Amino acid sequence: MNCTHKTRAALCRRASLLCILLLLPGTFLAAQAPAPPPRPDPAGPPPPQQEDVQTRIRVTTSLVVVPVIVKDAAGRIVPDLTRDEFRILEDDVEQHIDVFSSDPFPLSVVLLIDNDLETRVAEQVAATLPTLAAGFSRNDEVCIARFDQFFYPGKGFTSDPDVLLTQLQRVSVRNSPAPAPAGGPLGSGPKINGIPAPGASQIPSSARILKGQPTKAVDDAVYAAAQLLKDRGRDRRKLIFLISDGVNSKHNSMSFDDTVRSLLTAGISVYGLGVGNAFFNRRLTALSKFAHATGGDVFYAAQREDLERLYSAVSEEARNQYTLAYTPRGTDRSLDYHSVEIRVKRPGLSVLARDGYFAGLP
């Protein structure tokens, strides 16, 4: 009996030891395994996201941001270039590309429409404007403005495609100058027997309607559109779509150089869409001059069908740009203006980018 009892006790001890050995590995692994991540609190702040190019541009104020369009010999957009294929020179000094992106940016656009076109051209423009709405997304914002001798800012920016479509459908392009806004700064003031009263404000000579001369103030209109865009975020592509025949008065209040300065300081590009006689005076119009100075582009429509096709072309080109940004190094920071040159190493390509910037660029 004693032998049997001892045998049973030994078997029990062995069984207990075996159980402990079997449990030990699981206990060790459980101790070494990483603790599961805590579940996010629905009421707490969202987890931080990885910083993207747009965020970096928005928060880094020392960066000079240069949108770039690259085309092949046939005028097609080239979308597959890499950072290493670009070179940036500021004041002939090579710069390091700190930010590179080929991703589309949201657009802030002032659609600036000539309000003094020939009757036939005005009708074509008004009839085709609603097709522009298809080129914008909910991330974009668009403001519709018109001009002749004066500037009409419209109802402000909208990101709602339905609202934009409604506004475009209601645009009425007149074929003669509209009267000056009542009570505006260009009002002639009170008169006595047809003569301005003493101390009364008079219309500046630059704003008077001169018989036989163009009265459309393109420079003034582009400058006013730039004021609407200048405070939009740096993480947005700021553009003016200028639809006009390119006729420009010699009596603008703002000079071409001052207007270009305002555009470059705010990082705004002008895309011109020439209608009417602009097709025959391509290189002489204000559209081409503003587009070249700001790194934009210009298109010309001879017929109504060309208008609808070019609306899509302008939107596509504006959206499919490279973004290059750098912090200036090795240049004279006391200068007011700095030239910028963008080069690509791949042969046979043309580059559209602004020629420089003013030191006031934020």
Image (cartoon, grey):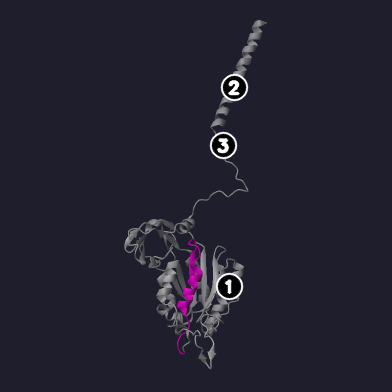
167 sits to left or right of 296:
right
Q: How many marks?
A: 3
Q: Which residue is mark 3?
A: 35
Q: Which residue is mark 1?
A: 155
Quarter the C terminus occupies: bottom left
Q: Are marks 2 and 3 in contact (CB under 8 Å)?
A: no
Up the image or down, 248 lies above or below 84; here it is: below
Q: Nearer the viewer, residue 302 or 143?
A: 143
Q: Nearer the viewer, residue 193 or 22?
A: 193
- Mark pair 1, 3: CA separation: 56 Å
One can see residue 164 in this view: yes
- Extreme right residue here? 1
Chain part drawn in magenta: 211-240
- Mark pair 2, 1: CA separation: 79 Å
Q: Nearer the viewer, residue 261 or 18?
A: 261
212 in the magenta segment: yes
* Tag in front: 2 or 3: 3
38 sits to left or right of 356:
right
Quarter the N terminus occupies: top right
Amino acid carrying label 3: it is Ala
Where does the image place residue 339, in percent across and percent down from the top left? Answer: 35, 66
Up the image or down, 205 lies above or below 128; here it is: below
Q: Earlier in the sequence, mark 2 or mark 1?
A: 2
- Rendered image: mark on residue 20: 2
190 sits to left or right of 326:
right
Amino acid carrying label 1: it is Lys
